[in-house]
Image: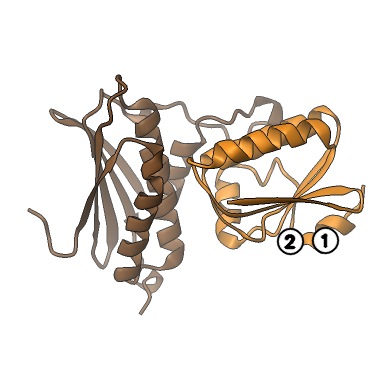
Chain colours: A orange, B brown
Amino acid sequence: MNIREDKVGSFTLLAVSGRVDSLNSETLKDYLQELGKRESRVLVDCSALEYIGSAGLGALLILLKLIRKQEGTLRLCGLSPRIAEVFAIAGFDKLFPIFLDLDSALSAGA
Amino acid sequence: MKAEGDLEARFASSLAALPRLHAVVDRFCRSRAIDPDIGFKIDLALEEVFTNIVRYGFADDRTHQIAVRLQCDRHRIRIQVDDDGRRFNPLLAPQVDTGAPLAERRPGGLGIHLVRRLLDEVRYQRRKSGNRLILIKRLAEEEKRT
């Protein structure tokens, strides 16, 4: 797993890539908990995310709660069909605004 | 009796064993030309099952062994996971309401939900020697690579 953070326009862009499993998900959770307290507009780029299990999904859920608490915006983009299916099974497609790619996520309103 | 083509491996009851577990599943799927999308599902489901056993299945701090047996024929993949821990049936965990609003969603409980949905059948057996989980993923003929 790799995490890279950038600024793109009004968004903090977080690219999470590789495999997020039960072994490294604590690292992601710690990162997202800290991020969710200091940033209010976050876009998570999942285009190079190969694998994510329930522990990684839980970390994203914590981030969403933190961002909503400060009435901010969290968007996800670039999910592969496999990852999109995992998100749908978890019901996350109803919780997270999910965009096809980076451009559409950045150009969507508000 | 071990049928030809089965793959059996034993793992220490630690999350540190996960990379090897993934490697074993990957080798099994590649060598049997299993569709990578199916391979992805059984890899994820097996990690969730394994993680659950490591986290909740043992009453002591000793390292235990978890045995994984993978079998595949034209119709299905069968995975058997055995451990010698206390009685632990993950299928009894409360179901996650995936349609609940954000305020009511909690990070826990998603693992076994994913396992049930990614696979076709999940069975639990309590045996003298410990717990056994049997995971089945059916293979449609068109889903197998030719």
Q: On the image, numbered disc 1 is attached to which residue?
A: A104
- B47 or B102, which lies in front? B47
Q: Is residue A55 above or below residue A99?
A: above
Three-letter residue code for mark 2: Leu
Q: On the image, numbered disc 2 is attached to which residue?
A: A100
Q: CA distance from mark 1 to mark 2?
A: 7 Å
Cβ–Cβ under 8 Å for marks 1 and 2? yes
Which residue is depicted at the point 56% across and 32% down? Answer: B97
For residue A17, side relative to residue B111 (left or right): right
Q: Residue extending furthest bottom? A: B146
- SS state under label 2: loop
Which residue is depicted at the point 60% across and 28% down? Answer: B106
Q: Position of residue A24 (x, y in %)?
A: 53, 42
Q: Position of residue B20 (x, y in %)?
A: 35, 51
Which residue is depicted at the point 84% across and 29% down? Answer: A70
For residue B135, side relative to residue A83 (left or right): left
Which residue is depicted at the point 11% across and 55% down? Answer: B2
Q: Residue extending furthest left? A: B1
Task: Kindly identify which chain the residue marked by label 2 belongs to.
Answer: A
Tell me whether marks 1 and 2 sit on the same chain.
yes
For residue A46, side relative to residue B59 (left or right): right
Residue A62: which disc?
none
- SS state under label 1: helix
Three-letter residue code for mark 1: Ser
User: Taking the image as drawn, is residue B49 in sight?
Assistant: no
Q: Residue A45 lies in what quarter of the image? A: bottom right
